[in-house]
Amino acid sequence: MRQCVSDTVKALRQLASEKGLKLEAKMPLDLPDHVFGDGSRLRQVMTNLIGNAIKFTDSGSVSLQVEPEMQTSEECVLLFSVTDTGVGVPAEQQALIFEPFRQADGSATRKHGGTGLGLAICARLVDLMGGRIWMESIPGSGSTFYFTAHFKRQTALESMQRVVAPAPRPVAPTHETSLRILVAEDNKVNQKLALRLLQKMGNKVTIANNGLEALHILAEQAFDLVLLDVQMPELGGLEAVAILREKEAQSGAFRQPIIAMTACAMSGDRERCLEGGMDGYVTKPVSADVLIEEIRQVLPGWRGPVSAPAPAPMPAATEPVNQWVH
Ligand code: MN
């Protein structure tokens, strides 16, 4: 929701600044992050109202505010308001303004152009979104256009449960020396370093760029071990492990061994990871010795890395890949 609102405002900022107007978006902290809805329709209505506000305002500001009017864990009604410091709409015109081919008055039509259809279309779209549209205006000092829209809510957990369908899980960790390891890590340099380290130990390595990607991959493939970075975009390690453990509890599936990788080696961090559902914990930069020891703890049947290291592919010479970053 925040993204949708701020993208809309960003797209109109140039138009506002050409007229010397301030354009801003206000969103309170309790605005839901994710809702089910038609983003393009919503953007169309916001764009139309803000565009109008800019058109009919010669000085001052235009602001878009979004706030929850009602919200439960399943649904919400959001109230959008676009306020300007423009010419305003005469009282006798206010009732007609959402009807097709009407504008505030004939002179405004000529001065400002437009088809007079914009607000009628907005009213239709708002109706389709289960909301209402109305306006308040003091001629000469500005207008506020309001609309509400009804959305179903989606929690992060629910959205993950949708993508992480029940999938065949490994029956038990392999006792072979070569492990199938999924590394979820957002940093490209760290990815290469982890790949090199783990391949040298003779393992088969798959890389995921964030927690969400890791969950998608885990839903389809079996791994002996997951190395999960804690700090990742889209979905962090602790969020991903919470979702995964919840799924395992529901389906009674085998518990996926997971080792957290974190850059913040602060006291209490290890406990936070273990309490969060991780089985082990290493800090970056990850050294081979520490990692091997941690894998032994997490996979008691593992006999250690193969004695003859597999040749690791060398990283591209142009990139310095010898420094772990967080
Ligand atoms: Mn990271």
Image (cartoon, rainbow, N blue to C red):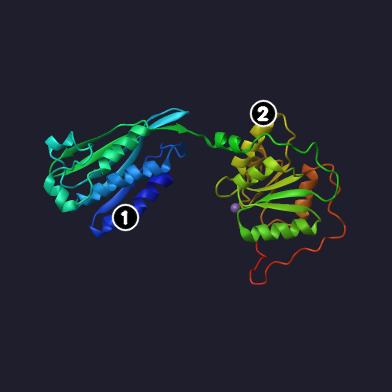
- Residue 68: % across, % down: 37, 34
> What amino acid does circle 2 point to?
Gln
Q: Residues within 10 Å of mark 2 (few under 14, many from 20)?
A: few
Give yes or no for contact between labels 1 and 2 (Cβ–Cβ under 8 Å): no
- Element on which disc 1 rests: helix
Residue drawn 31% across the image and 49% down it: 24
1 or 2: tag closer to the N-terminus: 1
Image mark for residue 13: 1
Dot 2 corresponds to which residue? 250
Left or right side of 35 for 237:
right
Closest to the observer: 206 or 49?
49
Can residue 165 be seen here? Answer: yes
Q: Along the horizontal axis of the image, is 146 left or right of 149?
A: left
Amino acid tagged 1: Arg
Residue 127 position within the rendered picture, expressed as x and y whole percent measured from the top left: 33, 32
Decide: is 75 above or below 177. Answer: above
Query: Residue 216: x percent and y percent?
Result: 64, 43
- Residue at 34%, 50% in the rendered image: 9
Q: In which quarter of the image is residue 15?
A: bottom left
Q: Horizontally, is 114 left or right of 264 in the view?
A: left
